Amino acid sequence: MSTREAFFRRLPMDDSERLTKDETALRGLFTEPNQIASSTLVDRFVEMATHAGARVLRCDIHQAASTIVEQLGIRGLLLYADDELFRRLGMYEALGRCTAIERIVNVASIPRGRARDFDGANASISVARLGIANSGALLTGISEGENRSVSLLADEHIAFLAADDIVPSLAHAVPLLRNTAKPDGPSAITLIAGPSKTADIEKVLVTGVHGPAALTIVLLSA
């Protein structure tokens, strides 16, 4: 058993004693792993994500491609993760027709050690694995077609999230984390709550220092 596996085996599956009243109410709405998120759960996520500084666009899954092209104004250099969802949505074709985008780079094709060459790209686009309702955070991971650079290097990060992938709290993400804690699993799981922020220098809040200065979440409904 690896150190990572051992760590996740020690995580409690039930932390109801530490849940706030709001979390307890949200947990009650989520009874099955694949259940579609209720409107209350989604609204809570949108509220908290907005409070953290993210921009949230809610759209039908069939309108996702046009929403990205028409509302976000992507231009210049775009980094993207190779994802099956994008192919089903027709994202690659829609982005290819956008004349303001000068270059599109698949992050899976970036050689190891060369990711910093793309620091300061105009935008990046990826798919989040889960949304955490009580914090508005996204849980992202890496895969064969995606590395961690997609959420770190660009000025703006655009993350797709399916409404039925929203869970009440981080405790509900433990099963997913447990499944990824394997020797052949991804090397990085990241929680993203709003744009990159720091107040290390004289307690002055600055965005965009350690990552994207803007985060847009495209929330997809069936």
Image: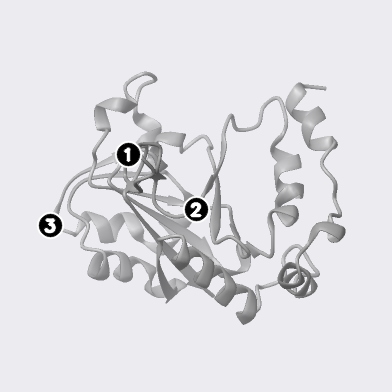
Measured Cα–Cα span from mark 2 to mark 3: 31 Å
Measured Cα–Cα span from mark 1 to mark 3: 29 Å
- 114, above or below 138, in the image: above
Left/right placement of residue 85 relative to residue 101 reads right
Measured Cα–Cα span from mark 2 to mark 1: 15 Å
Mark 1, residues whose alpha carbon is within 10 Å: few (<14), some, or many (≥20)?
few
N-terminal of the two: label 1 or label 3? 3
Which residue is label 3 attached to? 99
Q: Secondary structure at mark 2?
A: loop
x and y percent of residue 9 in the render?
Answer: 84, 36
Q: Residue at x 12, y 57 (%)?
A: 99
Which residue is label 2 attached to? 193
Mark 3, residues whose alpha carbon is within 10 Å: few (<14), some, or many (≥20)?
few
> Which corner quadrant holds the C terminus?
bottom right
Count of marks placed on residues: 3
x and y percent of residue 110 in the render?
Answer: 34, 28
Q: Residue at x 72, y 65 (%)?
A: 34
Whether tag 2 and tag 3 are in contact, CB under 8 A, the answer is no
Amino acid type, mark 1: Val
Q: Is residue 42 visible?
A: yes
Q: Secondary structure at mark 3?
A: loop
Q: Secondary structure at mark 1?
A: loop
Amino acid type, mark 2: Ala
Left/right placement of residue 204 relative to residue 43 reads left
Which residue is label 1 attached to? 209
Q: Residue at x 42, y 75 (%)?
A: 59
Q: Is residue 147 visible?
A: no
| Residue 60 lies in quadrant | bottom left
x and y percent of residue 118 in the render?
Answer: 26, 32
Amino acid type, mark 3: Thr
